[in-house]
Image: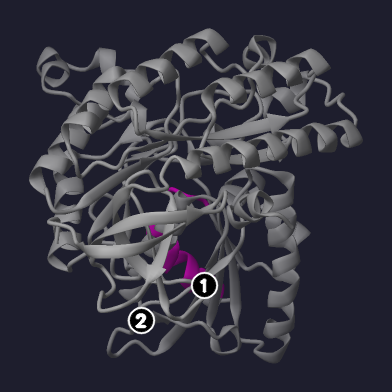
Amino acid sequence: MDQIEKVIDEKIQGKPLLTEQKEGNAKKLFIESYGCQMNMNDSEIVAAILAEEGFNTTGNIEEADLVLVNTCSIREKAEQTVRNRLQKYNHAKKRNPKMKVGVLGCMAERLKAKFLEEEKIVDLVVGPDAYRDLPNLVEEVEAGRDAVNVILSKEETYADVSPVRLNSNGVSAFVSITRGCDNMCTFCVVPFTRGRERSRDPKSIIEEIRSMHDQNFKEITLLGQNVDSYLWYGGGLKKDFKKASEMAQATAVDFAQLLDMCATEFPKMRFRFSTSNPQDMTLDVIHVMAKHKNICKYIHLPIQSGSNQMLKAMNRLHTREEYLELVENIYKIIPEMNLSQDMIAGFCGETEEDHKDTLDLMEKVKYSFGFMFAYSERPGTLAAKKMEDDVPLEIKKRRLQEIINLQQEHSLYRAKEHVGKIQEVLIEGTSKKSENEWKGRNTQNTVVVFPKENYKLGDFVNVRIDDCTSTTLKGTAVGHSDNN
């Protein structure tokens, strides 16, 4: 497996999550997350809710009273991975018959009660907006009844829940700012599993970040299915904004304003955000990024295809030309910006010419990173209902490999741009390859490794970049940065 494929695979890998133990809690929770960063953050919310019900998390499934898997539906492979994992839970349950097993997240929302029929091991099914009901659902299960709650909310559901930081390195953390998505891309199941867009009160966001600041966290990633759609006008769905009062509209806070508030309030913390949608991103956001040193110069900017025909079929509400114009303006305002992509190979009706358009767009942008997939039909989406999945698997695989190969070239090209420069790196942990090296990321989100010397976890360090691979920069520390 090459480096790019490892990055792709890691996006859906399960992560058993651990945390501090709350004194007096006697029950054990094993929770495992698959998919996006939102799922990881949701698992932290679940752990916080269940901690108040007497559960401490454990990394040992054999001793767990309750096993939860937080699922992803973005691809068929992600769902199959979860089903395979449930079979392993079954072995543990045979050794511990009192163990209860629950399915959380997008897959739970998509399949609902059907999950109980398909997977006999499953005792409860809980959608992304129903985690507050977990204490009641666990009671139902403990009383011998199956339990399901997959009701989607019209409000931000967990603004006042302080997430338990699971498997935290004590340096970086996620903070959710929006939930749901209104962009009905024909290939995507997210609007059906996560619901409509609604934003979180900026005051609660600032308070959560302040809590992280007081615990000495150094970097926050603002999360949402579409952060650029963030819009707080007092609550409710984004689609209802025009119905709000004139006062609410006049005092509304958009994403550029929120980002500016965060960076200004906490000048010693670094900020990232994910994920962006090209049709919703404004240059106001880019100007705010340019204004603040502590906003990282990196944007994940998915496009999915470089072909206008495919973008229209996918219901991406922008053209190839509009996307390239946005990219050009981003590079003009922040020349050192790193961009990454999501790309789908072999969508319904994709021709060889469409595929060549994708490769051509990649050549023009030269992304630093990428997440690339062969199209897999997702039940319930418009594409599944009305379009034929007509690109043969072998052609999908060949086109995907060509996209991966080109991305590897561009990743190395972008990595080499850093060589010879001194860059600020936040130390996040020990390198996987050497106990004698730290690893961290620069502002452009590229991994940097360098000798440990006398530096420590959480330090901001100036590092001279001496060499690189397509995925990693290698350097030498030249001193603390003035951000410490």
On the question of residue 376 being in view, the answer is: no
Q: Residue at x 68, y 43 (%)?
A: 75
| Prevailing SS of the magenta stretch | helix
| Foreground tag (2 vs 1) | 1
Q: In the displayed structure, does residue 328 sit left or right of residue 423?
A: right
Whether residue 134 appears in magenta in the rendering, the answer is: yes
Q: Residue at x 52, y 72 (%)?
A: 432
Q: CA distance from mark 2 to mark 1?
A: 35 Å
The label shown at residue 153 is none
Observer-nearest of 118 and 269? 269
Earlier sequence position, callout 2 versus callout 1: 2
Q: Residue at x 39, y 81 (%)?
A: 56
The percent position of residue 341, horizontal first and vertical second, equals 54, 34
The percent position of residue 343, horizontal first and vertical second, equals 63, 32
Kindly identify which residue carries mark 1. 432
The percent position of residue 97, horizontal first and vertical second, equals 66, 87
Q: Are marks 2 and 1 in contact (CB under 8 Å)?
A: no
- Mark 2, residues whose alpha carbon is within 10 Å: few (<14), some, or many (≥20)? some
On the question of residue 140 being in view, the answer is: yes
Report which quarter residue 418 is drawn in.
top left
Q: In the displayed structure, does residue 247 sit left or right of residue 306?
A: left
The residue range painted magenta reads: 127-141
Q: Secondary structure at mark 1?
A: loop
Whether residue 138 appears in magenta in the rendering, the answer is: yes
Kindly identify which residue carries mark 2. 54
- Mark 1, residues whose alpha carbon is within 10 Å: few (<14), some, or many (≥20)? few
Reply above or below: 206 against 214: above
The percent position of residue 184, horizontal first and vertical second, equals 55, 23
Observer-nearest of 88 and 393? 393
Amino acid tagged 2: Gly
Q: Residue at x 25, y 63 (%)?
A: 478
